[in-house]
């Protein structure tokens, strides 16, 4: 018999603090009694005050004993008195259940597909049954992240439900993180430290740069036997060809995790139709790379399948989305279309339509509209380039009109002027605009800006002169200037897109040398930002679940389709001395019984009995004695 919550000294101190005031109340609170009389008419007041003698004898000892015993029982309940030995004190165990992607691997054939996860759940239930009922367990699911499924729990049905709901994830195991978490939780628990149990095959992710810490002394391993005969896809990457924008270069990597050589076939399909196939001979423990080329402008799903399937089919199939070839529709309203035709049609993926001024219509969502020296009846609904508009119709106010003026400079701090260096120009005639503070003066003369860009819901660029009717038509700056304007208005037209199918978890990407970290954005499938880090030109981000992640860096975009499972890189070997198999807990530990519920019930019943016997009865007895004193013979009724 022992106390769980209090020591003996603490218990005696609390009981003394409660019992001493209770006894004093019985000695002092009932020494002066109330006298009930029939009338005060013949009552003669004493000249001297009545001497009150303090009682040294308790009139109701049974009431006091009941109260003290009840308080003692309640305090024993608070102290959590237990029957047994202190060695039977409950312990807190942590069960680490491996839920990495590799746990979906099959371990046997037959009508029922048995996986490593099924065996791990069976071992977890067996360990749960071997633990004394008074001990508590915490179930932790471990893959790349350590996730507690329960707190320290003694409710066995709740723990069994948590075990049954554990399924393989998409990332590899980080066992060091899981063991550190288990040790930290046990250190914070007020109960005795129990065991840390790892259930799994011990296939872990790539080894960390720092030395692996020694496993805890209370570690127990319930190993799950696995078969490593698996050959799967590691990564697939596609990008537009540098010579042909309609051609995709496809790169695939296949790894053999087993100990025997494998011959596999990698087949590609796009939009449901075949896109290529290649047979590979993969040595054990090695990688093999293969490249394909596929021509398409359309968007669609590129699927890669590895045949034949093995005991772990999850890494035999990958899907990634190929974006469509971006293009821009441009409508040019001009009565002299040949002036602008060479410049507009020279830009790749621009579909230009030339119409006379009389056919102008303000159509929404037309891409880009170029207005050549005329006043439209209604402004265009969308991005527009105005070339030498009439003064009264210019979207940017005209300050002055100059003739035979030398060109002064291009803007120096904006991408609209990237690569523009021409200065020795003279303009026969040009407008000078009154630019707003937020406008971008692309080209200027001494008197002010002559080419102005304005951002907003619709982007606008206004030329104060016609580039094809000035000396600018002989300069390389003309097509470069129009290219910069289109890049500013439609950046997706010049965006270099790549796509990759890889595994969830930690993703590492090398950035180009001209990319600055502040220009990088990493977005999840729903458009929300994803945290990332950059060190030098290396970008890293973590995604614990399958999905699509977009990495945007300046005019480049990489779409990661994280559909492949992240597999192990090494086998964790437990050092000698680590306990293995199911434990044999001492039967004596289960003899320890908790009595607080019974003690609390008895204490409450004792207080209730004391109140029923002495609390209400005392008032009734006092009233009865008062009536009897009135009827005594020595007291006469007044006439």
Image (spheres, rainbow, N blue to C red):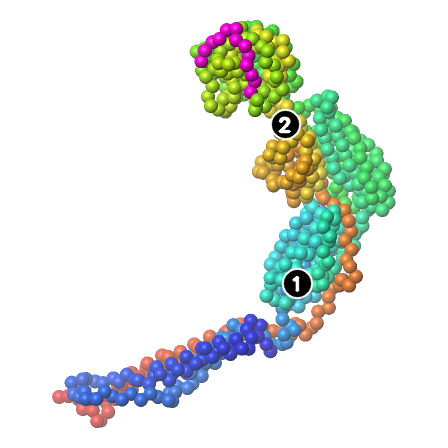
Vertical arrangement, residue 249 with respect to residue 229, above or below: above
Q: Quadrant of residue 596?
A: bottom right
Q: Which residues are magenta?
A: 399-411
Front in this rendered view, residue 345 or 257: 345
Element at label 1 = strand
Find residue 93 and name its label. 1
| Among numbered discs 2 and 1, the one appearing first in the sequence | 1
The residue shown at (67%, 37%) is 536
Q: Residue at x 32, y 81 (%)?
A: 619
Dot 2 alpha-carbon crowd within 10 angstroms: few under 14, some 14 to 19, many 20 or more? some
Rendering coords of residue 15 (x, y %): 48, 78
Asked whether 359 or 240 is in front, the reply is: 240
Q: Position of residue 336 (x, y in %)?
A: 57, 6
Q: Is residue 358 visible?
A: no
Specify the quadrant of the image occupied by residue 347. top right
- Residue at the disc numbered 2: 555
Residue 412 located within the stretch drawn in magenta: no
Q: Nearer the viewer, mark 2 or mark 1?
A: 2
Residue at 19%, 89% (x, y): give it.
47
């Amino acid at each position: 018999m022992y106390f769980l919550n209090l020591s003996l000294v603490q218990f005696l101190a609390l009981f003394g603090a409660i019992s001493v005031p209770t006894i004093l109340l019985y000695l002092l609170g009932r020494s002066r009694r109330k006298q009930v009389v029939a009338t005060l008419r013949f009552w003669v007041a004493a000249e001297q005050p009545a001497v009150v003698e303090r009682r040294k004898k308790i009139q109701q000892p049974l009431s006091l004993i009941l109260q003290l015993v009840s308080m003692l029982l309640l305090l024993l309940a608070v102290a959590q008195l237990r029957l047994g030995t202190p060695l039977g004190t409950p312990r807190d165990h942590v069960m680490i259940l491996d839920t990495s992607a590799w746990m979906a691997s099959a371990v046997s054939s037959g009508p029922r597909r048995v996986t490593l996860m099924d065996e791990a759940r069976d071992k977890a239930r067996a360990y749960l049954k071997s633990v004394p009922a008074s001990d508590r367990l915490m179930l932790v699911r471990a893959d790349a992240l350590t996730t507690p499924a329960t707190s320290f729990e003694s409710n066995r049905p709740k723990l069994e439900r948590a075990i049954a709901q554990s399924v393989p994830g998409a990332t590899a195991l980080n066992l060091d993180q899981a063991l550190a978490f288990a040790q930290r939780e046990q250190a914070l628990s007020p109960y005795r430290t129990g065991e840390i149990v790892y259930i799994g095959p011990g296939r872990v992710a790539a080894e960390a740069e720092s030395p692996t810490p020694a496993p805890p002394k209370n570690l127990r391993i319930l190993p799950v036997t696995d078969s490593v005969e698996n050959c799967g896809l590691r990564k697939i990457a596609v990008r537009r060809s540098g010579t042909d924008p309609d051609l995709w270069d496809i790169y695939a990597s296949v790894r053999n995790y087993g100990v025997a050589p494998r011959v596999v076939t990698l087949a590609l399909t796009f939009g449901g139709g075949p896109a290529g196939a290649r047979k590979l001979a993969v040595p054990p423990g090695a990688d093999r790379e293969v490249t394909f080329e596929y021509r398409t402008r359309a968007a669609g799903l590129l699927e890669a399948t590895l045949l034949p399937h093995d005991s772990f089919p999850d890494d035999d199939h990958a899907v990634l989305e190929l974006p469509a070839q971006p293009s821009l529709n441009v409508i040019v309203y001009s009565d002299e279309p040949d002036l602008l035709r060479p410049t507009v049609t020279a830009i790749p993926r621009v579909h230009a339509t030339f119409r006379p001024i009389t056919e102008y219509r303000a159509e929404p969502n037309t891409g880009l509209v170029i207005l050549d020296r005329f006043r439209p009846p209604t402004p265009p609904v969308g991005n527009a380039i105005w070339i030498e508009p009439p003064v009264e119709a210019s979207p940017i106010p005209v300050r002055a009109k100059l003739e035979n003026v030398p060109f002064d400079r291009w803007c120096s701090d904006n991408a609209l002027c990237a690569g523009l260096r021409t200065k020795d120009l003279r303009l026969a005639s040009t407008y000078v605009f009154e630019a707003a503070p937020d406008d971008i003066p692309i080209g200027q003369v001494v008197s002010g800006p002559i080419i102005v860009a304005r951002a907003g819901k619709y982007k606008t660029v206004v030329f104060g002169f016609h580039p094809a009717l000035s000396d600018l038509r002989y300069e390389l700056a003309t097509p470069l200037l129009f290219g910069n304007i289109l890049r500013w208005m439609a950046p997706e037209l010049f965006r270099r897109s790549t796509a990759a199918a890889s595994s969830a978890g930690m993703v590492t990407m090398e950035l180009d040398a001209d990319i600055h970290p502040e220009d990088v954005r990493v977005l999840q499938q729903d458009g929300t930002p994803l945290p990332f880090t950059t060190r030098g030109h290396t970008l890293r981000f973590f995604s614990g679940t399958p999905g699509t992640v977009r990495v945007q860096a300046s005019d480049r975009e990489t779409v990661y389709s994280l559909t492949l499972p992240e597999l192990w890189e090494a086998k964790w070997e437990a050092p000698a001395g680590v306990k293995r198999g199911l434990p044999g807990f001492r039967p004596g530990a289960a003899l320890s019984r908790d009595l607080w519920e019974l003690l609390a019930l008895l204490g409450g019943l004792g207080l209730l009995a004391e109140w029923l016997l002495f609390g209400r009865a005392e008032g009734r007895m006092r009233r009865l004695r008062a009536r009897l004193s009135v009827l005594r013979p020595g007291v006469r009724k007044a006439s």
